[in-house]
Structure formats: structure tokens, C-alpha cells
Image (tube, rainbow, N blue to C red):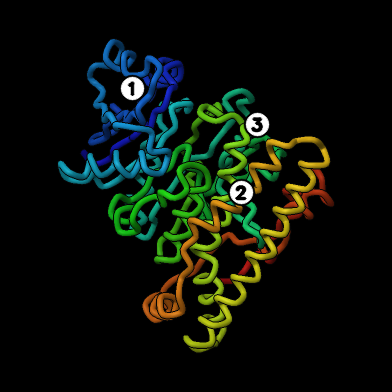
Amino acid sequence: MKTAVVILNWNTEGFLKEFLPSLVQSAAKVEGAEVVVADNASTDGSMKVMTEMFPDVRTIILDRNYGFTGGYNKAFDALAEAGAPEYFVLINSDIEVTEDWLGPLEQWMDSHPDCGACAPKLHSFQERDKFEYAGAAGGYIDRYGYPFCRGRVMKRLEEDNGQYDSPADVMWATGACLMVRSSVYRALGGLDERFFAHMEEIDLCWRMQLAGWKVTVVPQSIVYHVGGGTLPATSPFKLQLNYRNNLLMLENNLAKTFALQLYKHGADVEKATEKGMKKARRRIRQRKFLDILSAAAYLVTFKVSCFKAVRKAHKEYGRLRHISGSEEIAAYLIRYGNKVSVKGIYNKSIIFRSLLAGKHIFKKIKLEDFYKI
């Protein structure tokens, strides 16, 4: 097996019935590709569906719900026991694929050995000509860690008129459908299991870039995403995960990124490390303050469950955080400082810019407004 296309399923028997047939059919056209369904201890009829409707599709049964992160890590470990495929594809059960979605991704990885991960354009299943929220045509983050995409800023979605039809290196690509080089995935330790779900792919893509790999959107491949298949957008638990994991993501990557930027602009290892760590701490404090303002807004609008979700997110972040020490960052700069670059961090507030620009925000995002790292 060259490419393992893996659905991590949890209680989505309806999506399996609807979307798995076309996924299996499309993968069969690519030599060495196989579809696998890993089940996170579903309590609905998912496994009955697999047994009765898809007996030829390999399944991996996990003993409990390990979340998106732990579930994929365990599924990929199980596949690697028999000899790891060259590529893993993470794909949601609520994705409708096109007939030739997989080939362009595999071809891109084959011809670009410096690419650690790539993804298709993500369209809305409901509004077929529009990009979809979870990843659109590739993602960035702003200076405070808020993610946005080519084709999606906040809740504004662009129609796809071919404006992003050239392959492009981005900050992150959607975990709804993401091809990763298995050797890179394993070298980086896979997805960070503290995240459980949400923003884990942004963290993984950021870590890939810090290790010298590119992340690319390949627009010759298109898939359609329903969205909210496991957790609805209104879920306080989903809100909690997003707030908590955004801070964990910044803690994982920001100090190294700032230190790398300073090193590339002439600071020595010691000075870059010291100033990079200090700048990262300050930026995370700023982000936490913005979260507090957001929590206050929830409270005054009587969204008490959302207010509690933000509070709980901050408490869990404090318990789960891992702070990189100066020795770790200095060693990173010595190893990678002259070899890597990080793309896709916007040196402005995307929320503020979006409020000012309204529907014209997509035209207001300029390449010169991104950090040069």
C-alpha cells in the first residue's frame, strides 16, 4: 500500500452510507491506494454498516474514543505495523469526493519531496460553488493566532471563481482532507494528543514548517465538506476546545518562530532565543486578554455556557501547557536556523481588518502584510 486513505469515524453511520461508496470507488483508480475506516468506539450502527455494506473495506476498531488526535495516531500506528505506507490521508466521514481528487495530491507529493503535507480545495457541500469554512483554499493565522483562509475570513465565504487555482504554499491545510508524508508525520510525533480535536492540523502544519517542510494546497483536487458532522458549531465543548487548543498551539510554536525570525535578521543564537521567548510570552498574554474580552461579551449577551467554555479552556491550558526552555530553542536554532522558513503568519489582526473591510476583506489581505520568516 502506497497511500492509506483513513476515515476516523465516530457515530456517523449516515455519512458512511452516503459518502463511503464514492470514496472507495475513487481510491480504486489510484494504484496502491486503500481506504481504511478507523472507529473511535462508536455507539451507533457504524460498524454494522461496515460489516453489511462494506465488508471489503479494512476497519480498525479502537477500544474508546481517543478524539481526532489520538484516534488518528493510533490508526496510523496500526497501519505502520505492517509497513507504513508512503502517504497517509486524513479524511472526514462527511466529505464527498470528486472522481479524481486523490491522484493530483499523490502526484504533487511524488514530484515535490520537500512537501510534508498537501490538501485539496475545500468546497461547501450545501453551496457547491463556495469555499467551505474548515479550510477553503488553504489557511493562515493572524498575529494573535486566529486562523483564516484563502476564501474564508471569519464567517465570510468566497465563491470559487478560479482565483486560487494555482498551487500555493500556505501556513496550514485542512484536517478535513489532508495528505501527509508518513515519515514526516511519525518523525514529528503525529498529532498532539492534548488537543483531542480542533486546530490540531494547524499545529501539525506549523511544526512541519519549523522542521523544514512545506504545506501546499493543490487546487486540481476538489472535495465537498458538509461540516459539523461530529460537533455542531454551537457546541460549548467545541468552543472550549478551540480556545484551549489555540493557546496550546501558540505555546508549541511561537517562541521557536519568533526566535527563528530574529536569528534570520542577524541576532545570535543566545539573543534570538531570549528575545523570541519573551516576545512569545507577551503575545500569548495578549491573546488571553482578547479571550477574556470575548468571554465578557458572551456574558453580557447571556450566553453563559459560552462564557464558561472560555474560562474552562484557560484553566485546561494552564494545566496542559508545555513551555519550551531556552536550551531547547537554542538547539533548534543551531539545527534549523539557516535551513527553514515559515509562511503564512499575518502581521495584523484579521478580526479588526475584517470589521473594517467587510465583504472586501479578501482584497485587503496583502502579501507584504505577512511576517518574513
- Does dot 1 land on a helix, a strand or a loop? helix
Give yes or no for contact between labels 1 and 2 (Cβ–Cβ under 8 Å).
Answer: no
Mark 3, residue position = 234
Q: Nearer the viewer, mark 1 or mark 3?
A: 3
Q: What residue is at 57 percent from the left and 39 percent from the top?
A: 134
Does 209 sit above or below residue 260? above
For image coordinates 40% across by 31% down, the residue present is 100
Task: Calculate the distance from the C-alpha at mark 2 to the C-alpha at mark 3.
Answer: 14 Å
What residue is drawn where x is 28% and y is 54%?
183
**Quarter of the view holding residue 97:** top left
> Which residue was labeled with disc 2?
243
Residue 237 pos. (x, y %): 58, 37
Label 3 crowd bin: few (<14), some (14–19), many (20+), radius 10 Å: few
Circle 1 or circle 2, nearest the eye: 2
- Residue placed most toward the observer, 244 or 265: 244
> Which image quadrant: the N terminus?
top left
Q: Earlier in the sequence, mark 2 or mark 3?
A: 3
Label drawn at residue 324: none
Q: Nearer the viewer, residue 122 or 37?
A: 37
Q: Position of residue 43 (x, y in %)?
A: 39, 20
Q: Of the residues shown, which amino acid type is indicated by label 3?
A: Thr
> Which amino acid is tagged 1?
Gln
Kind of element beneath mark 3: loop
Label 2 sits on what residue type?
Tyr
Alpha carbon separation for disc pair 1 and 3? 34 Å
- Residue 57 falls in which quadrant of the image? top left
> Where's the C terminus, which quadrant?
bottom right
Observer able to see residue 240: yes
